[in-house]
Structure formats: structure tokens, C-alpha cells
Amino acid sequence: MTPDTLKESGYRVTEGADLSRRNSFRVPARTQWLIEIDDASALLEVYGLGTVKRSPLLILGEGSNVLLTRDWPGVVLSIVARGIHILEDGGDHALVRVEAGENWNEFVHWSLGRGFAGLENLVLIPGSVGAAPIQNIGAYGVEAREFIATVEAFDRHIGRLVRLDNAACAFAYRDSLFKREPDRYVVCAVEFRLPRRRELHIDYAGVREELAAMRIDTPSHAAVAEAVMRLRMRKLPNPAEIGNAGSFFKNPIVADAHAEVLQRANPTLPCWPATDGNRKLSAAWLVDAAGFKGVREGDAGVSERHALVLVNHGTTTGAHVWVLAEKIIAAVQARFGVRLEPEPRIV
Ligand code: FAD
Ligand code: EPU
């Protein structure tokens, strides 16, 4: 069937849209309706459409943190609005508004190119700016919450735009208010407070070594970005070459006492401090030790490069990837008594 596309002011509706190129696992899936919004002021009108009111709704950005295990029997909503504007510039810091449809990595490069500091550790994370607050994206010792001042979102419970400050977003490791109430808030724009000076964060394993290999003694923010890009390109499979969604499991947070027992039995298990009375364990190490690194079941597999990355070798389905994920969860639970939780949204 040829998709039937209707263009209205501020949004575009497609009936029967293919999602296989809209998810980084590259698994097949379709949606009954796709609504792409390029002007957030159209959200109220879209929200009033009968089809939107009656159908289950899924918000999708660039699809780099979802596993689609079936067709979507309703509406997929995607904010594609673009734009980056400096709202205030106080010298030391600036307040920058970024529309949800901007690409995250392009925004990081925009910020570095204009002399802002801090986002360099978050370079090359795939996806949209609108999705960044959802799981509070993080890498190499830095998280997006350190820069997010306000999130502007359409609250579907009350049918209007709301502005949530940093505290209201309740950010935590790979978590936020938005993740706990999926599809309630349609993020339209994010306002970032970006510093012009900030100390470098180069203590995460591998960063100093990479800078040394680049023969850089006094690194700049741009040099740290370059080091992080090199590390990421070496460690993680590129979704353009092999379908994946980055880390498939969150690093589990367990009580100190449990971590100590596990570390006594497994001295090489990496373990980091977490919130009071807890520690964060390396999920990659647990999956690796359970024997899953490089495992392949049909076209669903675990990357040979990184045990935390589930991959699509070609023509697997999201349902098959999920079967493999459940096997890994069961094996790690049986061997270490730790329950792994998926990081991507399982649809
Ligand atoms: P999607 O995958 O489309 O959506 C993710 C979630 O956000 C879904 O629940 C969706 O409903 C919701 N969502 C998306 N847009 C909106 C919106 N506008 N309003 C409300 N809800 C919305 N993540 C990290 O934190 N750190 C990493 O280092 C990292 N590395 C990665 C490496 C690779 C190779 C890949 C493929 C992924 C990696 N990820 C990482 C995960 C991913 O990049 C992030 O989660 C990213 O923010 C997802 O953006 P997206 O636009 O693709 O979101
Ligand atoms: N390890 C193994 N086997 C492997 C890979 C790693 O045992 O195959 C062990 C090593 O001991 C290594 C440790 O795991 O030192 C940690 O590995 P890595 O530095 O690659 O980090 P990670 O904990 O696996 C996290 C994030 C990544 C983020 C990197 C860098 C989570 C779930 N993942 O990975 O985020 O890029 O740190 O900060 O927190 C993502 O969220 O999608 C993602 C890629």
C-alpha cells in the first residue's frame, strides 16, 4: 500500500508508515499512523484530532533507544522541529534553547564551535535533543542533567504546554520523570545553561590514555571531544553498519553488602560508587562473564566488541532480539543474583 500523506500547517500525517529506517536496530515494524510535527504550536490541534484521541500513542525521536517488537497499532508522534537560539548571554554562561528535533551530536558540535564547554564528553551519542532528557543521557563521567535548565513539553494529561525546571525533571542515572511516565510529556524544546569555562572530566577509564596517544599534554575541550569520539568509534558498533541501540542493559545498582559479596567472589567485577548505601556494577562484565559476548542466535546477537550491545546481524526481528535479551537476564540472575534491566524502551 502506498502511504497516504496529508500535509497540514505545522504537521504531516502519514497512514501506514514504515518504521524500519526509523529505529537504529533496523528491525521491521510499521505504524498505523505517523504524525511528524515541525512546529510545536501545532500540538494542540494534533492532540484534538479524533485519531490521536482514540489510538495508543508512541513518541519516537531518531529511534536509537527503542526495540520495536511488533507493529504499532496507533499513532507514532515525532517532533522534527529544528532551531538553536541563544536566549541570554551573561558572559560566563549562556541560556540556549534547542528545539526537540535537532540532532544531539550536531548540537554538541555547535556548542563547542561557539566556545561553550562541558558537552564534549557527550559527543557522538546518537539521537535527538528532545530525547536527551528522557533517560538523562550520559557518557564518560558526565550527564545531560548537569546542563539542562528547563524542559518545555506538551503535557497530555492537561492538554497544554508546561515548563519543567531541572528539579522537576527528577533526573537520575538513565532515568527521569519522563521515563517514569512514558508518553505523558511530549518534549518540544530543551533549554541548556552552557558555561564558557568548566573543568575537564578526563578521569573516566580510557580518556587520559587516548589523549596521551594523541600526544596532547594540556587538553582543550575540543581535544577531549576528539578523544571520546575515538574511544566510542573503537568500542561501540556503528548502527549504520550493524543495527543496535547502544547499551542494552543499565548498569545495575545494588546494595553495598551485595556488591561486596559479589566482588569477593569476582575480584575483577568493576564497581562504582552510587547513591547512599548502593553501588553500581558493570552490566557488560556480568553479561561477558555469563558467556554471552559474541553469541549469535540467527541474526540476533551480542556484539563481539562489547558485551552490553545487542545487535541485528541482518534480518532479525525485535521479538527475536527480546528473546535473546530475556535469556541473558535469566542467566545473569541465576549466576550472580542480579536482575538486569533493559535500557532501551521495549515496545
Ligand atoms: P528514541 O530512541 O526515538 O526514543 C527514546 C525514548 O525517548 C522513547 O521512550 C521515546 O518515547 C522517548 N522520546 C523520544 N523523543 C521524545 C520527545 N520529543 N518527547 C518525549 N519523549 C520522547 N545513551 C546514553 O545515555 N549514553 C550513551 O553513551 C549512548 N550511546 C549510544 C550508542 C549507540 C551506538 C546507540 C545506538 C545508542 C546510544 N545511546 C546512549 C542511547 C541513545 O543514543 C539515547 O537514548 C538517545 O537519547 C535516544 O534518542 P532518540 O531521539 O533516538 O530517541
Ligand atoms: N566490559 C567487559 N566486557 C565487555 C565490555 C566491557 O567486561 O565486553 C567491562 C570492562 O571492565 C569495562 C567496563 O565493563 O571497564 C565498563 O565498560 P565501558 O567503559 O564500555 O562502559 P559501560 O558501563 O559498558 C557505559 C554506558 C554507555 C557509555 C559508557 C561510557 C550504561 C548502561 N552504559 O557503558 O552508554 O557510553 O559507559 O560512559 O550506563 C548507552 O547508554 O547506550 C551507552 C552506550
Image (tube, rainbow, N blue to C red):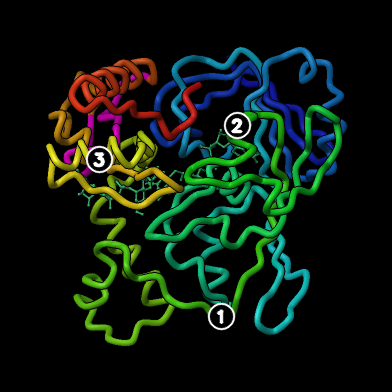
Asked if the stretch drawn in magenta spans residue 313, the answer is yes
Q: Is residue 325 visible?
A: yes
Place of residue 220 in the rendered image (x, y in percent of width and height, measured from the top left):
41, 82
- Upstream in sequence: badge 3 or badge 2: 2
Label disc, if present, on residue 284 of the rendered structure: 3
Q: What residue type is labelled 3?
A: Ala
Q: Position of residue 77 (x, y in %)?
A: 67, 30
Between tags 3 and 1, which lies in front?
3
Residue 180 is marked as 2
Q: Report if residue 82 is visible in the image.
A: no
Distance between mark 3 and mark 2 Cα atoms: 24 Å
Left or right: residue 261 compared with residue 58: left
Q: In percent of the image, x 27 and y 48: which residue is there?
A: 271
The response on whether ligand 2 sits within 8 Å of label 3 is: yes
**Amino acid identity at mark 2:** Arg
Kind of residue at badge 1? Gly
Where disc 1 sits, the SS reads loop
Q: Residues within 10 Å of mark 3 (few under 14, many from 20)?
A: many
Q: In this view, does 277 lie to the left or right of 272?
A: right
Residue range of the region highlighted in magenta in the rendering: 302-317
In the rendered image, residue 118 lying in the magenta stretch gets the answer no
Q: Mark 1 points at which residue?
A: 115
